[in-house]
Image (cartoon, grey):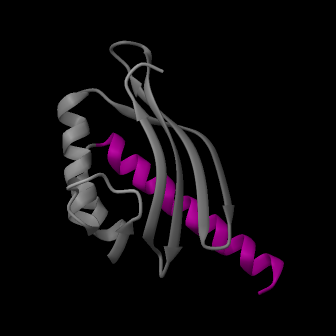
C-alpha cells in the first residue's frame, strides 16, 4: 500500500469515527445502522450488553437517560490504516464540566466500523 493510499484510508476512517460521535451528540442512534457493520463487535462490552449494533444503541439510550444533556467532545484522534484511536470527554453543558472520558480504538472496513475497544470512565473526573 502506498503512503498516499494509507493516508487516504486513515483519513476516511477518522471521518467515519467523527460521524459516529456526531450521531451521538445529535441523539441519532438509528444512524448507527449505516455507520457500524452488521458484524460489529464491541470487544469491551459490559456484562449483559446485547451484542452488535443493537447493544451500542442501547448503551447510547442509557447514557442519554442518565445524562440528558451529555455531549462528546473529541480531544485527540490518531489514525493508521484501518485503526483510529480517540480521546474524548463526555461533557455536561448544563454543569459546564466533564462527566467522563474514554480512550477508544475503532477498526474500520468497507466504510463501516467493525470493532471497538475502549476504556470508559463516567462520573466525576
Look at the picture and state if 43 lies above or below 123.
below
Q: Residue furthest top?
A: 95
Question: x, y (%) of residue 68?
Answer: 22, 28
Which residue shows up at 81% across the image and 84% down it?
2
- The residue depicted at 42 percent of the width and 48 percent of the height is 21
Which contiguous range is marked in magenta?
A: 1-26
Image coordinates of residue 101 in percent, x first then y, are 48, 34
55 or 46: which is nearer to us? 46
Answer whether residue 74 is magenta in the image: no
- Quadrant in the rendering for residue 78: bottom right
Residue at figure coordinates x 34%, y 50% from the top left: 23
**Looking at the picture, does residue 99 appear above or below residue 76?**
above
Where is residue 36, by image quadrant?
bottom left
**As drawn, which residue projects farthest toward the bottom?**
1
- Above or below, comparing residue 20 to residue 88 in the picture: below
User: Horizontal and vertical percent for residue 12?
Assistant: 59, 68
Q: Main secondary structure of the magenta part?
A: helix
Which residue is found at the position 49% from the left and 62% from the top?
A: 16
Q: Position of residue 90 (x, y in %)?
A: 42, 32
Q: Quadrant of residue 39?
A: bottom left
Amino acid at each position: 500500500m502506498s503512503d498516499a493510499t494509507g493516508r487516504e484510508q486513515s483519513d476516511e476512517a477518522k471521518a467515519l469515527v467523527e460521524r459516529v460521535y456526531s450521531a451521538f451528540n445529535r441523539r441519532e442512534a438509528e444512524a448507527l445502522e449505516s455507520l457500524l457493520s452488521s458484524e460489529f463487535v464491541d470487544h469491551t462490552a459490559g456484562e449483559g450488553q446485547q451484542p452488535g449494533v443493537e447493544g451500542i444503541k442501547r448503551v447510547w439510550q442509557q447514557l442519554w437517560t442518565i445524562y440528558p444533556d451529555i455531549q462528546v467532545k473529541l480531544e485527540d484522534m490518531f489514525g493508521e490504516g484501518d485503526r483510529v484511536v480517540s480521546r474524548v470527554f463526555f461533557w455536561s453543558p448544563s454543569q459546564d464540566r466533564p462527566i467522563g472520558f474514554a480512550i477508544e480504538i475503532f477498526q474500520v472496513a468497507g466504510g463501516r466500523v467493525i470493532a471497538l475497544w475502549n476504556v470508559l470512565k463516567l462520573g466525576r473526573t
